[in-house]
Image: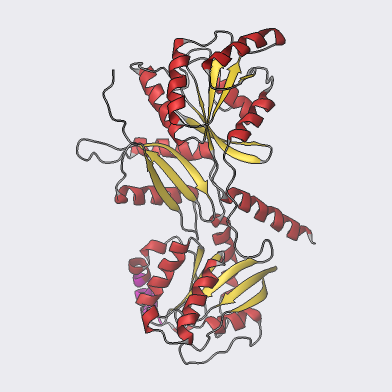
Amino acid sequence: MTHADMIGDDLRDDLERDAAPSPVVAVVGRPNVGKSTLVNRILGRREAVVEDVPGVTRDRVAYDAEWRGRRFTVVDTGGWLPDAVGLAAAIAEQARLAVELAEVVLFVVDATVGATDVDEAVVEILRRSGKPIVLAANKVDDIGAESDATALWSLGIGEPMAVSALHGRASGDLLDAVLSALPEPAPPETFGEAGGPRRVALIGRPNVGKSSLLNKLAGEQRAVVDDVAGTTRDPVDELIDLGGKTWRFVDTAGIRRRHRENQGADFYATLRTQSALDRSEVAVVLVDASESLAEQDLRIVSTVIESGRALVLAFNKWDLLDEERRFYLDREIDRQLHNARWAPRVNISARTGRHVEKLVPAIETALENWGSRVPTARLNTFFSELVSAHPHPVRGGKQPRVLFATQAGVRPPKFVLFTSGFLEPGYRRFIERRLREEFGFEGTPIEVSMKIREKRGGKKK
């Protein structure tokens, strides 16, 4: 195995690990019990704001963390004071939200003070959440203070884990308990065999030149080429060396307009095309640039986007175009392929081989962005600035807000927005556009979904 192969395998392992959503651990407790200090201890670096004044942490701040190879997101909440007013009430509301979205709650209590009435009230709320709770008895700096932690059994939520966030005492045991409480990780999504060459689906409507392109890339006559539309009926996997790498190309039967119009072998060829797309990582959609964009072209591009695969647009027969046709093609692309403006575009000629070498950097760019992850803290900084500068329009006297965001997965990048209300489609498109402007994502679809915080019924006392 070459050094490059080892690097490729390591990268693929990282992508598989990143593909699973990162569970959320919410760190909650009343003000000044040492939550931010404990968060810094978990992270192994100083990121959360720490100051010896109650309530300094006013906003939820999310961080990426890892322990024993398991990744998770830590949400550092402000102090939680039930029935508080003003600033404390806002902090409490943020903490409630964090508990609702978390898989595990890390409840921090100051062992030197003991369980207060506020702690008791918080425990009741935590019990009602139904979430696993890990009880951290903080500020146990030496053996003599362990009896203070033991007294917290009275809270009735399990064993108090005696820790010192300041000195790091027993922090490893605490993290082990958090990992034990996390749900089992979902198996990572796989695409065909593990490892091996990256998989490219070469698709397009019948007779756009897929087989000719495959033959040009392979450097020899392998696929049947004929002017009769739909000549190629079987997908032909080809291992092809390009740009110093080996790629697995899948040449597929042409996609026809609708299943019911297909007869016999053509019908099954369409199904095999979908199967090839399902087991690919990136799709190169070949379009006949000498003709106006057809409805099938647009449908194929939409199919790739819906499947969540990386996308490259290859405009074939470019050598046959005059200046007028190129002008009108640009206008067609801008008007009809607006949902794929982020896809790399390569103008080629499968017949002559013109610019086919440009496919490789386009494919590599698409695959890299397909597996990219934005650090959670940077993502929330971005959203904080975005919604502050461009808040959602007020509708019916209400103004929904983005309260917290996380990247739930990769391949393609998936983002979940925790909101105080429904975000209109236009505002979600605005968010996606700004995400692309800020973080790139050239060549990959991105998924943006909402988790709306439902208002609780009943009157406040």
Residue placed most toward the observer, 199 or 45: 199
| Image location of residue 255, percent across then percent down | 45, 78
Is residue 197 at least partly visible in the picture? Answer: yes
Q: Is residue 381 above or below residue 407?
A: above
Figure quadrant of residue 38: top right
- Residue at coordinates 35% horizontally, 17% vertically from top-left? 83
Depth order, front residue of 228/209: 228
Q: Indicate whether 259 appears above or below 341.
A: below
Tell whether position 323 is magenta.
yes
Whether residue 350 is visible here, answered yes or no, is no
- Report if residue 439 lies within the magenta region: no
- Magenta-colored segment: predominant secondary structure: helix
| Residue 39 vertical position relative to residue 180 in the rendered view, above or below | above
Image point (36%, 16%), residue name: 84
Q: Is residue 69 above or below residue 6?
A: above
Residue 197 picture quarter: bottom right
Instruction: Give the colour scheme shown.
Output: secondary structure
Considering the image in quadrants, where does the C terminus appear? top left
**Which stretch did the figure color magenta?**
322-332
Give the camera-side residue of 161 and 246: 161
